[in-house]
Image: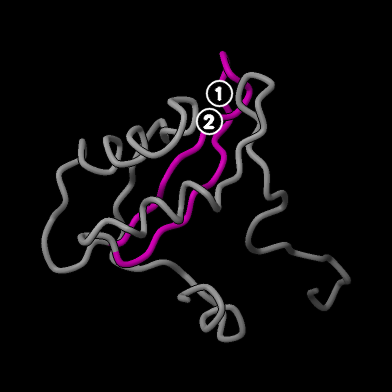
Amino acid sequence: MDEAGYLYLHGRVDDVIVRGGENISPGEIEDVLRSHAGVIDVAVVARPDADWGEVPVAVLVAASRPVPQEEPAALVRGELRSSRVPADFIWWDELPYTSSAESSARR
C-alpha cells in the first residue's frame, strides 16, 4: 500500500487460468517445466487471448545453456493435456522475488 492508500498487488491475482472454459493450474505446468534439467526457475501466467479467453505463458530461467524452444513444449505435451502447453515460452535471466517470497518460491 502506498502513501495515498492505493493497494498494489504483486504476484498472481488468481491461481487458475481459464482457457476456453477449462480451468488450468499454473502450478502443475510449472512442476513439469522445473523437471527439465535446463530450467532452474519458472512462472506460468495467463495472457488474454481473443479466441480462448486466456492462455498459459511460461516465463523460464535457463541453467547454463540455452534450451531449444521446442523442448519445454514437448515436455509439457508429454506429461499433461495439450490444452496445458503454454502458448509462448519467454526466457529471462531471473525471476523477480520479494525477500519473503524468495525462499518459498524456489523450493
**Residue occupying the far top of the picture:** 51
- 10 Å neighbourhood of mark 2: few (<14), some, or many (≥20)? many
Amino acid found under the numbered disc labelled 2: Val
Prevailing secondary structure of the magenta residues: strand
Residue under label 1: 49
- Where residue 76 sits, quadrant-wise, is top left
Q: Are marks 2 and 1 in contact (CB under 8 Å)?
A: yes
Front residue of 77/17: it is 77
Q: What residue appears at the point 72 percent right and 52 percent down from the top-left corner?
A: 13
Tell me: 9 left or right of 40. Answer: right
Q: Where residue 56 sits: x, y (%)?
A: 50, 37
Amino acid found under the numbered disc labelled 1: Asp
State whether residue 1 is above or below residue 18.
below
Residue under label 2: 55
Spatial CA span between label 2 and label 1: 6 Å
Q: Give, as a single range, the part of the protein colored magenta.
A: 40-61
Q: Where residue 45 sits: x, y (%)?
A: 54, 46
